[in-house]
Image (cartoon, rainbow, N blue to C red):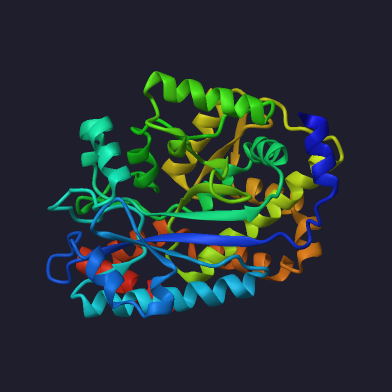
Amino acid sequence: MTSSAVAAARAVDTSRLTVGVEEEFLLLDPATMANMHAATAVVEALPADVRAQSRMEFRHSMIEMVTPVCASLDEVGGHLHRHRRAAAEAARTAGARLVAVAATPVGEPERTVTDNPRYKAIAAHYGPIVDDPAVCGCHVHVGVPDRELAVQVCNQLRPWLPVVQALAVNSPVYAGADTAHASWRAMQLDRWPGLGPSPWLASAEDLDRTVALAVASGMMLDDSLILWHARPSSAYPTVEVRVADVCPTTADTVLLAGLVRALVATAIDDVAAGRFAPPIPDHTVRAAHWNAAHQGLSATLLDVRRERARPAWDLIADLTEAIGPALERSGDRHTIEAGLARLSAEGTGADRQRRLLAGSGDLRSMLDVLSRQSVDG
C-alpha cells in the first residue's frame, strides 16, 4: 500500500544507503579470441578470500564477481579493482583472458550451460533461446529495507533507466563485426521473457499477483526469473538495477553505482513526500530502452516524461539535476561529476570499442586493449 511505503520512506536515511555490485566477465581464448570454456578453472585459481566473492554463471565462458555490501563509492571501487585484478590473474593461470565486454565478440564454440540444476531447468524450458552466446551485465543493488517501498522505488526509476542504460552501453561488436547497436547484449536479451522494463505496479500485492500469473502461464519458469531492469530483489533487502552492460573499467562501474544509488535515494525522497511516479505506458518505456540500446549517447534519447526525442546529454543533465540533492547528502557529487565529464570526453564503452576497431581495423588488437583496460582502466 502506498501509505505503508510513505511511512517506510520517511524512516530511511537516504544519505547512508548501502550499495553492492555484481559484474560479469567474458573468458576468451588468447589464440582465437573466441569464448573459452574456462570458468571452473578460473574460479579454482582465485585466492580463497576472493573466490568467496565469485559465482559461476550461465555459461562456462563467464565469471561473476560480487562486492560485499558497501557504504561508500570508494569502498565499492576498492573491491571492484581488487576483484578484477584477481580474476584477470586467475584467468591467465587458467590459460584464458578476462575481458569486460558485454556481448560475445567472436563466437562461442561450446554453448552448454554450467552444472547448476536451475540453469539446466532453464535450458530445458526455453529451448533454442538458451543457445544464444554469452552476454555480461553489471547489476547494482541499493539497500531498501521495506518491500512496499521497494516496489514504489522501481516505479520511480522507470523514466530514468533508459538514460542509465544509454551511458552504460558496451557491446557493439558481435561475431566479429559491428552490429550497428551500441548494446547488442540488450538486443539479444530481448528474446527472453521476464527481462526488459519493469512494469508499473501499485503495491507488493500487485507484484506478487503479476509474478504468479507469469509463472502460471509458463512464461517464467519460477519467480526467480523476474529479471526486469529494476526489481525488488528476491534474495536481499535491496532494489536491484540490471539494465547496464558490464562496464569497461572500474571507474565506469563506480560511476554507474553512484548514479543508481542517487536515483534510489531520490526515489525514496519522492515517495516520502507523496510524489508518486505516473504509470507511463509500457510501450513507451520499452521504446525508450530500445533507443538507448541502439544509440547510446551518440544522438537522441526518448524522454518518456515529455514523450519526445531529445539530445542524449540534455537528458543526462536532467538526471544529474534531479539527483543533485542526493549526491550532496552522500558526498558523491564530485565523483559523479568527474565521471560524467570523463564519459563526455571518452565516450561510452561502445564508442571506445568502435574507435579502437576503426583505428586498428583489427579485432584482436581491440580486444588486447580492452583486456588491459578491464583491469587497469
297 is higher (above) or lower (below) than 3: below
Q: How many marks?
A: 0
Nearest to the observer: residue 267 or residue 341: 267
Quadrant of the rendered structure where residue 206 is? top right
The N terminus lies in quadrant:
top right
Residue 90, x across and y down, in percent: 29, 77
Q: Position of residue 58 (x, y in %)?
A: 30, 50
In the rendered image, which quarter is residue 274 located in?
A: top right
Is 104 situated above or below 3? below
Q: Nearer the viewer, residue 33 or 270?
A: 270
In the image: residue 333, left or right of residue 239: right
Image position of 45 with respect to 135: above or below: below
Residue 120 falls left or right of residue 212: left
Vertical side of 170 occupied by 90: above or below: below
- Residue at screen point 55% across, 77% down: 78
Residue 303 position in % (x across, y down): 62, 35
In the image, what residue occupies the spot 44% across and 61% down?
A: 23
Q: Does residue 361 appear in this view?
A: no
Left or right of residue 65: residue 150: right
Q: Give the image location of residue 217, x and y in percent.
A: 40, 19
Residue at x 54%, y 43% (from the top left corner) = 234
Q: Would residue 124 be visible to someone looking at this image?
A: yes
- Residue at x 70% of width, y 49% of height: 145
Quadrant (top left/top right/bottom left/bottom right) for the C terminus: bottom left
